[in-house]
Every structure is written in structure tokens, then in C-alpha cells.
Image (spheres, helix red, strand yellow):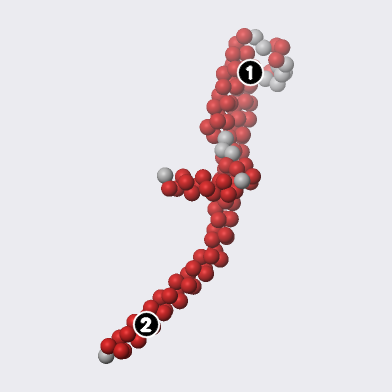
Amino acid sequence: MNEKAKEILAQMLQRVLDGVDTVSEFAAQEVPIVVEQLLMWHMVESLMLCFGALLLLIGWSLITRKFYYGENAWAKISYDSFDEDGVMAHVVFTVVVGYIFIILLDVDWLKIWIAPKLYLLEYGASLIK
């Protein structure tokens, strides 16, 4: 009986080891694909945020110009024709634009494109924190 139990235990252990080998081979084949898909997803997500911020900036520019100049918003393109209020409005606009670009403009897509290994290291570090 003891001999039979040892044989069954050896067979079970061999099956477990074969399963571990199969899983490790599968993981070794799939990890590069998973990493590529992870990079692609984060790049597309970052590009969407970047273009969204750019569209927001263009919309904000059009709305403030129309609000400040009224009906002839496109007639006063020259900066020579601004009065002090106009200059102040555009200074405030520049500060707002800078804030939007600092907060909303996500340039992770550029980091993924130029240095994907660096991005992966930083992403892994952010997951650990």
C-alpha cells in the first residue's frame, strides 16, 4: 500500500511540474504581447487626453474672442488695436491656457514613443507605490 501511494504521489507531482512548465512557456510567449498592448493602450489614452486639451483650448479661444469683441470678432486680429482691457483679457487668457496645458496636456504618449522602457519602469514603480 505504501508503494502504491508513493507511485500515485510521484505521478501527481510530475503532472504538477508539467503544468508549471506549460504555464511558464505560455507566460513567456504572451508577456511581450501583453506589454505591447499595455503600451499601445496608454499611448492612445494619452493622445486622446492631449487632443481633448487642444480642442478645449481652441474652443476657449474662439469663445473668449467672440465674447470680448462681439459681432466683429474676426475683424480685430491686430494686436495694435487692443486697449488695456483687451491686453489684460489676453494675459488672463494666456495664464488659463498655460494652466490647461500643464494640467490636461498629457505627454505620456511622447514618452512611450521615444523611451518605452523608461515608461514601463515608471509605470511599474507607480504600481508599487
| Image position, residue 90 (x, y; %) | 61, 18
Gap between marks 2 and 1, in whole Å?
86 Å
Asked if residue 76 lies left or right of residue 94, the reply is right
The answer to whether any part of residue 48 appears in the image is: no
Q: To which quarter of the image does residue 73 belong?
A: top right
Structural crowding at the residue carrying mark 1, measured as other residues with C-alpha within 10 Å and reported as few (<14), some (14–19) or many (≥20): few
- Determine the residue positioned at 53% across, 32% down: 103
Query: Dot 1 lies on which element?
Result: helix
Residue placed farthest to the top in the image?
Answer: 84
| Residue receiving disc 2 | 10
Residue 39 coordinates in the image, percent (x, y): 57, 51
Q: On screen, 3 above or below 32?
A: below
The amino acid at mark 2 is: Ala
In the depicted structure, whether residue 15 falls above or below residue 78: below
Task: Point out residue 75 in the picture as x, y percentages from the top left corner.
Answer: 72, 18
**Residue visible at 60% across and 43% down?**
111
Give the label, 2 or 1, closer to the camera.
2
Answer few, some or many: residues within 10 Å of disc 2's Cα (few below 14, many 20 plus, some between 14 and 19).
few
Residue 110 seen by the camera: yes
- Quadrant into which the N terminus falls: bottom left
What label does residue 34 carry, if any?
A: none
Viewer-nearest residue: 95 or 16? 16
- Element type where label 2 sits in the image: helix
| Image disc number at residue 70 | 1
Mark positioned earlier in the residue sequence (2 or 1): 2
Q: Residue at x 54, y 58 (%)?
A: 34
Task: Give the number of marks.
Answer: 2
- Of residues 96 and 6, the one nearer the viewer is 6
Q: Amino acid at mark 1?
A: Gly
Residue drawn at x 42%, y 79% is 15
